[in-house]
Image (tube, rainbow, N blue to C red):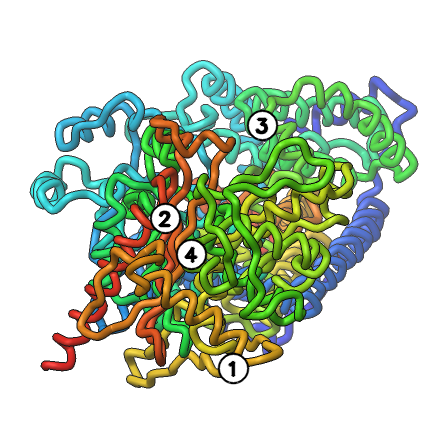
Amino acid sequence: MKTKARIDSIRKRQKIEEKYSWDRVSDSEEERHSHKIRAIIAAISITAVFVLFVFKLYELQVTNHEYYLVKAENNRIKIRPIQAPRGLIYDRNGKEIAKNFNTFDLIAKKERVKNKKVFFDNLEKVLSIDEKEREIIEAQFSDRKLKDITIKENISLEEFSKISVDQHVIPELELMPKLKRKYLHPLETSHVVGYVSKVSEKDLDSKVVKIYEGMTDVGKIGIERFYQNLLVGEPGFERLETDVQGEIIRTLKTNKPKRGLDIYLTIDLDLQIYAYELMKEKEGAIVVMNPKNGDILTFVSAPGYDTNLFTKSISTKDYQELLTREERPLINRVIAGQYPPGSTLKPFVGLIALDEDIIDDKTSFNCSGSYKLKNNKRPFGCWKKEGHGGTDLSYGLTQSCDVFFYRVAELTGIDIISDEIDKYGFGERTYIDLLGEASGLIPDRAWKRRVKGLPWYPGETLNVGIGQGFFLATPIQLALATSIIANDGQTFTPHLLLGYKDIKTNEYKKYEYEQNKYEVTIEDEEHLKIVQHAMWRVVNDANAGTAAGLRKINNMVIAGKTGTAQVYSLDAGKSQKKSLQDHALFISYAPYKNPEIVVVVIVEHGGGGSSTAAPIAHKIIKKYVSNKETVAQK
Amino acid sequence: MRVITPGEQKQRLISGFSALFRVDTKLFVLVMTVTVIGLITIYSNTGGDSNLVIKQIVRILIGLTAMVFLAQINPDTFRLFAPILYTLTLFLLILVIFFGVGKSAGRWLDLYFLRFQPSELMKIFVPLMLAWYYSDKPLPPRFIYLVIGSIFVVIPMLLIIKQPDLGTALLIGMSGAVAILLVGMSWRFFIGATISLAALIPLLWINLHDYQKQRVLTFFSPESDPLGSGYHLMQSKIALGSGGIFGKGFLGGTQSKLEFLPEHSTDFIFSAFGEEFGFLGTLILMILYLFIALSGLGISIKATDNFGRVLTGTLSLTIFLYVIVNVGMVIGLLPVVGAPLPFMSYGGTSMVTLFASIGIIMSIKSHQRILRK
């Protein structure tokens, strides 16, 4: 049995044993026993390790199962939002103002791009890409958060077909369909409707606006912003199973998006466009409001701007141009433009004086062309140098006599005026359904001390009496105040929302204007009648009215008040330089009995209210009447 | 002399397979069960692609052939060839340093008709060499023999670290340590050696490659680098943990199928299996491995000479050590070193050498001389 090797090794061992004679002789039985003990110790050791591992596995798989299960699901399942079509915006007659259209974004899947240089070379074969665009694309490559790279947004149909044909050249590319907003009358409706644009950090912080996962666009301004939560709908989502590369394996679940609600505005698009045309080459504002319910039929801030520029991320150049243009198109003049109301404030000053029993309809002051206040060196002039002679309230309004209102203001005093005039809506936002409204300014003693650090001077009271000086009002405030006079002391908060409709259920919900009644207590109804009559005379007293040049329209009697607000200095009115000319204002309502519309027109640096603003209001009322007749004929 | 009763004789004849091929039935069944579990897991991981499974079956068949072949050979022949095989493989390891091929590290030797990792062969030849060396020494050996035995372990280790393949080097080092422990190193000496080795760690650290350092660092805080090396461990734990008690079921694993679990059919196959078969599955698998090691140890106790004892003891303990290193890695108890799971991981050389180890164990069992009482 013994092989040569065995014999050799035994011989070798014997040799060693001879050499080291103190070596113990190998004891087979002892070695066997010793090995057995060591083997048993080894067995116990590995069993101990086994137990330890089983405990660890138990902890992982049984104790912490839930924790790891969630992690595994997070690995595997991705939620992809589906864009909800935004609600459309219509005017009061159902004419489309804002709609959606289909467009495509050209994207590339990052993980599919193996060689960047080859990718760019191929890309240039299909698309023309300039240096700047290339830089933006490269920047997206280094952004680790991005999985897809947007090569080009909103590509044209022509490019679309070209890319579709050439797609085999660059298989990394994909076309992502997307809904984009389109404004049909961007310039005319810019300040009412506003626009949607990319969601920004600020939007994410907003507590009011709901930002859904995966939402790309959000209303930034105007109706689009104010009613964002109605328009936005609810995005749907897909639960996708993806692999480690993010490739979709299958769709687990799809929740369809809910389309946003369609909004109907109180705006009459025809009238709106017409009014905007009238303001061409001018800066200013036009508001047409129904005093009986607060509907805003026309809301023009001129000039407008192209809101469609903003929906496809506006270029810095275009944006700078809009920001720096002298006409300042981005300002919403109707709600944020604060103007001295000029003579258009006189009816309200007169009403307060009547209510406070400071004057009555018989009270008469003599106008000699100017009025000299005690301790004031310089006299306060009337626009009519030769004077109006004996003037009562009605004649003072009809002729817009400044001296009469200097006297009224002096007698009433700034404290009563500032206390009382706010009931007509001045000095406070109207709470129209738009953001960014200015509150105007009613100056008083406390205000002057606080802001200017100076006491109130009596001469300043006189200036307030004719709507000059520190007093500021927005066009929408003037529209509200005029509505109060027109509708016998009560009207409704101006609003742009007529109602909204759920396209799916066809359920229409009307805006309930009745809940926002705006009522003013006027001591004596007779006082209102006096002022209303005077405003009738402004337009209809052929001999005296400052706006008597306006023709009557189809038995539609107009009442109004002109205003010319001075800019900078007293001499500015005569300057030929446009920026130094006066603002032209006109507030009006029609018909005189049972009014349907209030029209406020402000033309910046337009010169006289009667020569510039009143004819515009007249044209608008005429258009309103003719529109109404065509509707009636139908 | 022990008398074999007729009943026992009959028993042996019934298990004719065992008698004929000198195959130990118990060990064979245990190993084959694990191997089949491995095949099932690979099949599931690839989403029902039988391509890999067939390749793996071919390797298993080669391994089985090697096992049966080695089981026939008399242990004396192993002893005769031990120094030659060891020296030859040492030479191959040196060749690898100069001519090695491989993706990240040159571990493979390309012989045109055959590509293999000499370092894998060392997993058998180091225990074989030590068993040979101590077979004619009186045990427990004197200090000088321990030093010489250690040198047999350290030389291939250094060559393998050079490749660089830290994992295999450590495994070989551990199997050497197991052999030396088994031959009868005194425990006091063993503890002393461990402490002095620990003192050598800084020296080792300096000589580590950057990626090896990274692995060690990641082991201590896997969350510090969730997208890098810690990613493997995190995903492995997620796979195992999400399996729960009963698992997600055959073909139900998502971590493995969607490739979140890297190396799901090789180094991390245990996690992939645990995801689909849960704690019950991993428990059974661990028991199977424990039984393989214990029955190997049992054979080593019954062996009739030092050569057989050291060789079987070392080989069976080494197999379990591999399990510890791999499973310890995937459950986060040990650092991530690229070490396959015995009999399960997809891969050729390791499968063949492991079956060869089993074959050697079987040979020693079946050739044991009847003990004299």
Q: Which residue is mark 1?
A: A515
Query: Which comes sooner in the sequence, label 1 or label 2?
Result: 1
Find residue B211 and name its label. 3
Cα–Cα gap, marks 3 and 2: 83 Å
Dot 2: chain letter: A
| Mark 3 residue type | Tyr
Of badges 3 and 2, the one in the foreground is: 2
Does B276 sit above or below residue B166?
A: below
Is B349 left or right of B123, judged from the image as shown?
A: left
Q: Which mark is residue A609?
A: 2
State if disc 3 and disc 4 touch (CB < 8 Å): no
Instruction: Decide which of tag 4 and tag 2 comes sooner along the chain.
Output: 4
Where does label 4 land, which residue? A214
**On the same chain: label 3 and label 2?**
no
Residues tagged by mark 4 and mark 3 found on one chain of the structure? no
Q: How many marks?
A: 4
- Point out residue A352 in the picture as x, y percentages from the top left corner: 61, 66
Front tag of 4 and 3: 4
